[in-house]
Image (cartoon, rainbow, N blue to C red):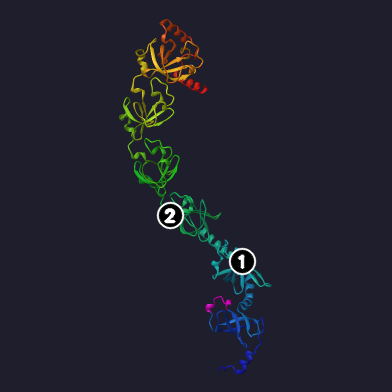
């Protein structure tokens, strides 16, 4: 039977010396909000700050702990104790052994300080931010309160400080996983991964120790402007292993390969001639790309937008996102190209143009547009006829259609030709009547006295408008018996004059007039004709085109 300690023994226990710096066991006898009272066998209890306990909520009365006596007794008779310093001193030998052997130690992250973390491993140790993980973390607070394994990389016995690294252990673990993945992975495997980084050309996927590249072209069968439209950093996904380079430790990954290639059975899904629905996804100068389904796009060339309208660029009639119908014109599966047409949804008006507008047909319509070479008359919606300047008058030289027509004029014309291949219909105004030069002898003879108004002035003479829309030319030498230096000194546009026909040139379609010969006899007329016939080249009655040009030059000099 074991006897109980006598009162004298208890007195001896409390009389044992308490020296500062010594480590003794103690029993927790009272819990306070900021401190703990510990009985260490002295005359009075010792005090341990509550902050020295990692989890103060788990501390219970009666717990026995080792403490270091910092001060045996202060003025108030209190004994100052430290649980942390006792653990530090007790653990120091163990930590030195771990460091010498290159071992690891478990620790709990206590706090964030400038440049890294404070970790409790029995003693307080420092982990630089660069040694927390493979890449320095952006938020160190996320590590506080967690337990991790660390490697002791530096120990200073004199200062009693310890430097730890978690990065080396993480790298070693990742290397082991990387080597394992590279050895066991084969193309076609489906692996789970996490999006680690996104670039313009793709995304890097962390396969739990090994990074693989998911190129933008392998993300989806459809159109993708940027990887960020489909992925986000931190996203988990399943990917297909496409290729492995074990020497360079590179892995190519795919996402779209998880589903079938939509081009595999393209001919059966979109046969030639079929009517399809799609959405405009891109507009370019030469056409519009239309998405028929994810991964399948067709091109509507600008020439396939309309049978009749001359569309300069697709953006004039289409907009991105617009849904439309089209007809499949052609398929090239190898190049993954589909040709589409919109105009094929309607009948081609040029197929009936020749039957509706045979040559000789009289047509009527508004002038839709003027160009330097002619005018366009609208025959029907989307179908125009072109009146060339040379087909506007039998007798007058038309330099620009605006001389006789203006936009919006309602005119009649005659169909001259239908060119289906080039989609052109030629029409004429002058063909509504006959060419007056065919019967010029019935209208004018040499010696006839005629009256008309001056229409144009030139340096060499004046043009006079006659009946039947024919112009006659009065040479400057035929204006007056007196010498005329400048035609504008004696004649004005719009002035009515009487003149005699002194020459008719059927081949060159020219009529020569003389104002001064209005009262001449036949003998005098023959003399004037001889004078005209003897004029030097350039002084003669020139072609109307040259005469009109000279008239414009003459106006500029005046």
The reply to whether residue 331 is visible in this rendering is no
Q: Which residue is mark 1?
A: 114
Q: Nearer the viewer, mark 2 or mark 1?
A: 1
Report if residue 57 lies within the magenta region. Answer: yes
**Numbered mark located on residue 401 in the image:** none
Q: Which SS class for mark 1?
A: loop
- CA separation in Å, label 2 and label 1: 47 Å
Report if residue 306 lies within the magenta region. Answer: no
Task: Quadrant for the N terminus, please.
Answer: bottom right
Q: Which SS class for mark 2?
A: helix
Residue at 36%, 23% in the rendered image: 430
- The secondary structure making up most of the magenta span is helix
Start-end of magenta stretch: 50-58
Disc on the earlier residue, 2 or 1: 1
Residue 36 or 143: which is nearer the viewer?
36
Q: Is residue 135 left or right of residue 532?
A: right
Q: Which residue is mark 2?
A: 258
| Quarter holding residue 76 | bottom right
> Measured from the top left, where is residue 479 in percent x and y?
46, 13
């Amino acid at each position: 039977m074991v006897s109980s300690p006598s009162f004298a023994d208890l007195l001896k226990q409390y009389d044992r010396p308490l020296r500062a710096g010594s480590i003794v066991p103690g029993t927790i006898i009272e819990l306070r909000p900021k401190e703990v009272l510990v009985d260490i066998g002295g005359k009075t209890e010792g005090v341990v700050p509550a902050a020295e306990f990692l989890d103060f909520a788990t501390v219970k009365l009666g717990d026995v702990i080792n403490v270091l006596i910092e001060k045996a007794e202060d003025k108030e008779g209190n004994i100052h104790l430290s649980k942390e310093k006792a653990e530090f001193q007790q653990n120091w030998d163990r930590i030195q052994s771990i460091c010498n052997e290159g071992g690891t130690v478990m620790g709990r992250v206590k706090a964030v300080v400038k440049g890294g973390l404070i970790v409790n491993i029995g003693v307080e140790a420092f982990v630089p931010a660069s040694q927390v993980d493979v890449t320095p973390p952006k938020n160190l607070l996320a590590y506080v309160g967690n337990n991790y394994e660390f490697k002791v990389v530096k120990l200073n016995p004199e200062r009693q400080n310890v430097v730890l690294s978690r990065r080396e252990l993480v790298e070693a673990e990742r290397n082991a996983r990387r080597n394992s993945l590279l050895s066991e992975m084969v193309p076609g495997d489906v692996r789970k991964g996490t999006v680690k980084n996104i670039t313009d050309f793709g995304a890097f996927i962390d396969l739990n120790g090994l990074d693989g590249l998911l190129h933008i072209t392998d993300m989806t069968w459809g159109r993708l402007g940027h990887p960020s439209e489909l992925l986000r950093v931190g996203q988990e996904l399943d990917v297909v292993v496409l290729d492995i380079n074990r020497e360079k430790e590179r892995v190519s990954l795919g996402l779209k390969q998880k589903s079938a290639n939509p081009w595999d059975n393209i001919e059966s899904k979109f046969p030639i001639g079929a009517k399809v629905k799609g959405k405009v996804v891109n507009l370019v100068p030469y056409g519009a790309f239309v998405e028929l389904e994810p991964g399948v796009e067709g091109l509507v060339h600008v020439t396939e937008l309309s049978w009749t309208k001359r569309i300069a660029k697709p953006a004039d009639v289409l907009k991105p996102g617009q849904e439309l119908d089209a007809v499949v014109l052609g398929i090239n599966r190898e190049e993954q190209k589909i040709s589409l047409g919109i105009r094929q949804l309607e009948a081609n008006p040029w197929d009936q143009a020749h039957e509706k507008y045979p040559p000789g047909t009289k047509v009527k319509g508004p002038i839709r547009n003027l160009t330097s070479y002619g005018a366009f008359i609208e025959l029907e919606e989307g179908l125009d006829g072109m009146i060339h300047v040379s087909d506007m008058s039998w007798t007058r030289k038309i330099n620009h259609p605006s001389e006789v027509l203006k936009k919006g004029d309602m005119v009649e014309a005659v169909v001259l030709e239908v060119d289906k291949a080039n989609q052109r219909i030629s029409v004429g105004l002058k063909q509504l009547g006959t060419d007056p030069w065919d019967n010029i002898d019935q209208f004018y003879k040499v010696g006839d006295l005629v009256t008309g108004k001056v229409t144009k002035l030139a340096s060499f003479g004046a043009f006079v408008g006659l009946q039947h829309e024919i112009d006659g030319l009065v040479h400057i030498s035929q204006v007056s018996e007196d010498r005329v230096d400048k035609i504008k000194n004696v004649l004005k546009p719009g002035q009515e004059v009487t003149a005699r026909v002194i020459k008719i040139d059927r081949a060159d379609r020219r009529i020569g007039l003389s104002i001064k010969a209005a009262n001449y006899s036949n003998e005098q007329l023959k003399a004037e004709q001889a004078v005209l016939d003897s004029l030097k080249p350039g002084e003669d009655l020139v072609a109307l085109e040259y005469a009109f040009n000279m008239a414009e030059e003459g106006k500029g000099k005046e």
